[in-house]
Image (cartoon, rainbow, N blue to C red):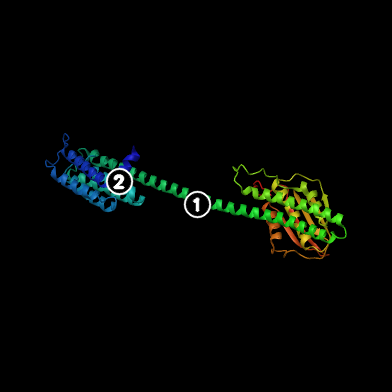
Amino acid sequence: MTTNLERYAQRYRRVMSATVVMALLGCVTLGALLRFPGISQPDEQWPAVLLATVACLALLKARARPRTAVAVVMACSVATFAQGYLPTPLMLAPLMLALYRVAAHTDGRTTRVIGLAAMTLVVVGALLDNPSTNLLLLRTVGPVLWLLLPLVGGTNARLRVAYMESVHARATHAERTREEEARLRVAEERMRIARELHDVVAHHMAVANAQAGTARHLVLTRPAQAEQLLGELTATTSSALIELRATVGVLRHSGDPDAGSLEPAPGLDLLPELVSTYASAGLDVTLTTEGEPRPLSPGVDLTAYRIIQEALTNVTKHGTGQGADVRLTYVRSRLLISVTNDGTAAAPEPAEGGGYGLMGMRERAHSVGGDLRAGPRPDGGFEVSTALPLHSLAPEEFETP
């Protein structure tokens, strides 16, 4: 009901303003006609009606100029009460509306100053014509109480509007923040998928290239061994296709009926299989575990596997030796991993941030709260070492290879 009335008032503002003016004139006219026992009032009502007309006309501009309107209405009210009219609520109606508009559309300091001035002037005007103690409370305390009502009501309306504006501003800010967070999550997801694709493609293609090169050299002299390598090459490419399908599968819609089930993310339990693929490519990998193996969180397990995979891929592509050593050490709450090759010190990328391989390994280690170092060894070869917590220090989301 209130909402419909507000909408009607906004749509037909002039009609509502004219209705309010007529209602206020009626209130003042009725107040001028009232007679109280023992109280003498002017016999003529037209001075009060004339002053009320001027005050109501000023109220038509109260929305645009509330201070000017209340000054005119205040002057008319004081002049009316100075003639001997009793300051009843009916006679105070135009001033009450003017004070409400001031309180609703101006600041608190202006409201207090104008309200105090209106109360003082009305009380003084009411006492000028009749300074006796006859109905003293009605001439002094009464106007103060009646004029407080529009001041309080207007202040509450102003505070309510300010509150609604602040709620709207917070909602707008929250919506903008959600959009920014969504864009950030999309960017992070793209980076994660790109990192997974890099690891999968680099690993399998490096192994496949080594197997194909070895088979080419052996096809004439050792055809049986070349045929075995070609079989292993087929298994390597098949494994690459499976991992690529699982990685890209996260981009498909969850409701797609053709979307197949995704394989679980690889971890250190698949490390022997990983080592065997490099062995088929001619790389002798030694796997050593120190300390009692402990369960890892899914994110750390995947990170450890991918770091070892990328490090061995770099040995296959850039290393000059034929061997690599992978060492896992469980120490208290951390897992220490080192991958070293026994060739000359040929770094695949600058140790402090050149290529995508080392950058990807560092990002993976940092994403779970670990650290990674890579560089030439003093006695030759290259080493990648990382320290990972057993459980991720950052909130983990399910990762798919």
Q: How many marks?
A: 2
Between 393 and 246, the one lying in front of the other is 246
Q: Is residue 222 visible from the viewing direction of this image?
A: yes
Farthest residue to the left: give it: 43
Q: Quadrant of the N terminus?
A: top left
Q: Label 1's element?
A: helix
Q: Is residue 285 visible from the viewing direction of this image?
A: no
On the picture, is 248 further left or further right than 13?
A: right
On the picture, is 260 further left or further right than 159?
A: right
Residue at the spot of label 1: 176
Quadrant in the rendering for residue 16: top left
Quadrant in the rendering for residue 383: bottom right
Q: Position of residue 18 (x, y in %)?
A: 22, 45
- The circle drawn on residue 11 is 2
Q: Label 2's element?
A: helix
Q: Is residue 214 above or below residue 130?
A: below
- The circle drawn on residue 290 is none
Give me the residue at 74% from left, 57% from top.
205
Q: Position of residue 31 (x, y in %)?
A: 19, 39
Return the disc, 2 or 1, that comes first in the chain's sequence. Answer: 2
* Spatial CA span between label 2 and label 1: 32 Å
Tag 1: amino acid = Arg
